[in-house]
Amino acid sequence: MDYDVVVVGGGPSGATAAEDLARSGHSVALIDRAGRIKPCGGAIPPRLIRDFHIPDEQIVAHITTARMISPTGRMVDIPIENGFVGMVDREHFDEFLRTRAAEAGAHRYTGTYVRIERDTDGTHVVYRDKESGEEDRLTAKLVIGADGARSNVARTEVKDGDRIPYVIAYHEIIEAPGKVGTYDPDRCDVVYDGQISPDFYGWVFPHGKSASVGMGSMVKDVDLKQATAALRASSGLTECKTIRKEGAPIPLKPLDRWDNGKDVVLAGDAAGVVAPSSGEGIYYAMVGGRVAATAAAACLKTGRVKDLQLARKLFMREHKSVFKILGAMQDAYYKSDERRERFVSLCHDIDVQRLTFEAYMNKELVKARPLAHIKIGLKNLAHLTGLVRPEAV
């Protein structure tokens, strides 16, 4: 059959776009490769849970403390006041979202995207069916490319879609019941150490009976598996059983354009919407899927292809400032271990702690405390210029 929209990719972004469009009465097809699990710490903020109606059974852990660890081993525990960080397991969370999209009316197809063809009959998405191994095609008025970082849809359909900078992320899901070594099932550990990652960070994130231990880097000669092994060892998790291992690119900068001006719009990692510095992606992917669905619905209603530009405009209107600030933080503090040491030292500050997690949980800059923002700006400058010495461990 012909569809209003074919969504390529069934991760959080694509599944959200498909569900939103199906619920608004559009005919939607969702093409996804079965069995792929993205390496991801799995953290989601309360705003995501509220905005996208995530049931509690999908939350495998409720985190109440974040620990920042510096190159010298300084540890700063940041309590998460008036909230929590929810943790999901992507193996089950992504399938939950795809199933919910199907229940809303989206038609699911299992296969791998090959290309887009156009003729007098319309736009056709060619994919390789997983069961038959043969090429098949779906006809649509519009296509949403939500096929992840290094998106094939973006590469072939959108200007500069193949030029997104990215880190390669790798993690291992391990069995980690209870407290083991320095591991705490109620705390996320973020490790800023050049021995683990020379330009990003490592993480140890609880997932209930399991945990995600991993890191990322843009440096090509970094041994991701060796770095992760070192991270496991430092946390006392070496002997824990490994359940699975995964690696994939994570984009670091949104594309300047998300549509091709005729029938394709990008969403999620394909558009580059992972937060700089933190690497947070699930929330922004789902927002990206939602605004792509909004743009597609507008285009279908008006017939104006210019309406596809709404996806990027709506996203940037709300999140551009946060991305800009996080990008500046990454540029300032991830360059060397000396800078990382100063960054963790800055995290001792109570204003930094409170504003950081208020912004994280609600996904907006906190405007109610102007004096606190001024104080943080001055302290940040003092740390970067060396006027303040990092506190002793």
Image (cartoon, rainbow, N blue to C red):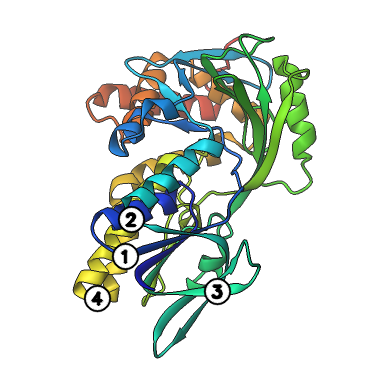
SS class, disc 1: loop
Q: Are marks 4 and 2 in contact (CB under 8 Å)?
A: no
Q: Which one is in front, 155 or 115? A: 115
Q: Regarding mark 2 in the picture, which secondary structure is present there?
A: loop
Q: CA distance from mark 4 to mark 3?
A: 29 Å
Q: Is residue 80 above or below residue 153?
A: above
Q: Which mark sits nearer the N-terminus, 4 or 2?
A: 2
User: In this figure, which residue is indicated by the disc labeled 1?
Assistant: 27
- Asked whether the residues under the numbered discs 1 and 2 touch, taking CB atoms below 8 Å apart as contact, a structural biologist would say yes
| 246 to 165, vertically: above or below | above
Say whether marks 4 and 3 touch (CB < 8 Å).
no
Question: Could you tell me if the residues under marks 1 and 4 are in contact, i.e. CB atoms within 8 Å?
Answer: no
The amino acid pointed to by label 2 is Gly
Label number found at residue 105: 2
Residue positioned 44% across, 48% down in the render: 98
- The kind of residue on which mark 1 rests is Ser
